[in-house]
């Protein structure tokens, strides 16, 4: 049989399951990018968590380093204690504060990263 004499007729085959296009899933990331009300709520929750953390660390700083002048005023005899030829308050101010500052900074960074990871996990799940 010669195909040129009888052209083959094409048949369109379709599935009985016709898919309708779904609206795109609105993720938390998309909400933040679009700056929608939901995105604003997500961002506000992260900012509140970070602000709460900053207040806690600042309170810890005030309770440790910030109270030193009151301790030195309340106990004037500390000036009479000499370490390496320096009064104790000077030694504390020169050497004792920095480990506290480093520790508070380390705690703050770790907690801030945890807040951000929790936020990212929440946004990706939504």
Image (cartoon, rainbow, N blue to C red):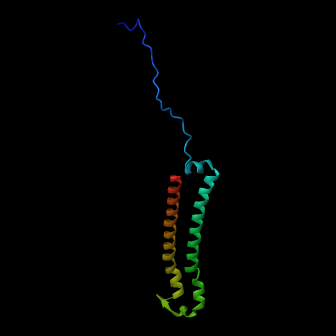
Residue 7 position by quadrant: top left
Residue at the far top in the pictured view: 5
Coordinates of residue 105 in the picture (x, y in percent) = 51, 70
Query: Could you tell me residue 23's position as x and y percent?
Result: 56, 40
At 57% from the left edge and 87% from the top edge, which residue is drawn?
71
Q: Nearer the viewer, residue 3 or 72?
A: 3
**Horizontal and vertical percent for residue 56?**
57, 72
- Residue at x 47%, y 21% (from the top left corner): 12
Q: In which quarter of the image is the N terminus?
A: top left
Q: In this view, does 82 lie above or below 1?
A: below
Looking at the image, residue 28 lies above or below residue 21: below
Residue drawn at x 52%, y 56% as measured from the top left: 122
Question: Picture quarter containing residue 79?
Answer: bottom right
Say whether residue 47 is left or right of residue 88.
right
Q: Can residue 9 be seen in this view?
A: yes
Most foreground residue, 110 or 96: 110
- In the picture as drawn, the residue positioned furthest to the front comes out as 16
- x and y percentages locating residue 86 in the rendered image: 51, 87
Name the residue furthest left.
1
Q: Residue at x 57, y 80 (%)?
A: 63
Q: Nearer the viewer, residue 112 or 93?
A: 112
Residue 65 in view: no
Most foreground residue, 106 or 125: 125
Q: How many numbered circles does the render carry? A: 0
């Amino acid at each position: 049989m010669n195909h040129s004499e009888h052209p083959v007729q094409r048949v369109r085959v379709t599935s009985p399951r016709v898919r309708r296009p779904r609206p795109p899933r609105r993720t938390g990331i998309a909400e933040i990018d679009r700056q929608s009300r939901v995105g604003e709520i997500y961002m506000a929750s992260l900012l509140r968590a970070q602000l709460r953390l900053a207040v806690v660390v600042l309170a810890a700083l005030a309770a440790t380093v910030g109270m030193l002048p009151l301790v030195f005023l309340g106990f004037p005899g500390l000036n009479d204690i000499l370490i390496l030829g320096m009064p104790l308050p000077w030694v504390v101010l020169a050497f004792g504060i920095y480990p506290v500052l480093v520790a508070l900074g380390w705690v703050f960074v770790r907690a801030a990263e945890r807040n951000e990871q929790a936020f990212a996990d929440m946004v990706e799940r939504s």
